[in-house]
Image (spheres, grey):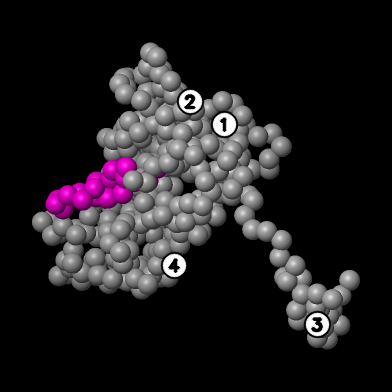
Amino acid sequence: MAVRIAEYLGQRTDCDAKVIEPIALGTDALCPFMDKPCSKVSKKRRANHPVCSVRKPNDEIWIVCEHRLCSTSNTKKVTLPERNRKGEPKTKAVKIGLVAHQIDILKKIAKTIYREPIDFSKVMVKRETLVPLPEAENAYHADYIMRNLSPGAKVDEILLEMQGGGETNNTGSITTHIDNWAANPYRTNEDLRKSVNAGTLETNAWRRQQEQFLVKGNVVDQTGGKIVFAVGSELYDYLEKRFRNAGLRDLRAHNWTLCILAFKEQKVSPIPGPIPLEIDSNKVIFSNYSTFVRFLTDQGGPEPSIFEGDFITLDNKPYHVDASLP
């Protein structure tokens, strides 16, 4: 499998009108998708080039940065004029607002889940909200809590989870490819978007999200709210293969408790800047959260054959077990 770099620090690579310049690692290069420096660049690690998304062989994008779809970060560090005892500048965390990209994504989600007309001055969000679970060893946080306080609104309390994409394998090949591109004084965007021997890991993305999805969704469902899972188009396709036979009822016009929606690339003539995203109207499902969870946790059936066949004893001897044994 191969992928191509689709976005580099918010600049799409399939547009040659403006030559993309490499970003020095360890700098405070501003992320165009949130009001703070790029978290990859600031880590000063060679492998952390500011790649936002890659393009798969089917030409669809796969988001590889957690902040690309809609960042949930709500604070950033700022440098103060004072210095500490070591003579180093002091820093403190300050709250940050929503940038235009985040507002755009959140409005598109609100338009999909809330019935028209919507008064956006009455739609509000909280980021990284603690979901209390006293018996759990780990702390759980909702990406977004969304409220709709518009007069007469029939849908209000939403827990919104974001998973645009996930990891790639063979990341070393991607790092080497970008290193070589950056070192070339005659670099072009065409060079940056050449194929790299790497692949996307949809399975890992869902595995990492699954526990969070189940636990937080259960809390919200019992509280009387609804859960919305916003994903990239490719991850939606991966999930759809698993729930297509679940017999989920379409409850969009009724009392739905779960919505899964997919963002895809908006196909427009490329211009310098980010790849615009839109919700794919063909990849939106409104259904019942409890039914969906039962399907996820009740897959498979009895299979005695897994306990038969060739074994090895703990004194290192072969042993065959067949169905005739009691």
Residue 5 in view, yes or no: no
**Residue 137 on image: x %, y %:** 68, 43
10 Å crowding of disc 2: few (<14), some (14-19), many (20+): some
- 3 or 1: mark nearer the eye: 3
Q: Residue at label 4?
A: 169
Earlier in the chain: of badge 2 and badge 3, it is 2
Earlier in the chain: of badge 1 and badge 2, it is 2
The residue positioned farthest toward the bottom in the image shown: 317
Dots 2, 3 in contact, CB < 8 A:
no
At mark 4, the secondary structure is loop
How far apart in space, not on screen, are marks 3 and 1 (Cα)? 49 Å
Disc 2 residue type (three-letter)? Glu
Looking at the image, which is closer to me, 323 or 131? 323
At mark 2, the secondary structure is loop
Q: Residue at label 1?
A: 220
- 3 or 4: mark nearer the eye: 3
Disc 1 residue type (three-letter)? Val
Earlier in the chain: of badge 1 and badge 4, it is 4
Please report the bounds of the magenta region as a residue range. 261-281
**Residue 122 on image: x %, y %:** 36, 19
Disc 4 residue type (three-letter)? Asn
Earlier in the chain: of badge 4 and badge 2, it is 2
Residue 148 in view, yes or no: yes
**Residue 9 on image: x %, y %:** 28, 52
The residue positioned farthest toward the left in the image shown: 17
How far apart in space, not on screen, are marks 4 and 2 (Cα)? 37 Å
- 2 or 3: mark nearer the eye: 3
Q: Residue at label 2?
A: 157
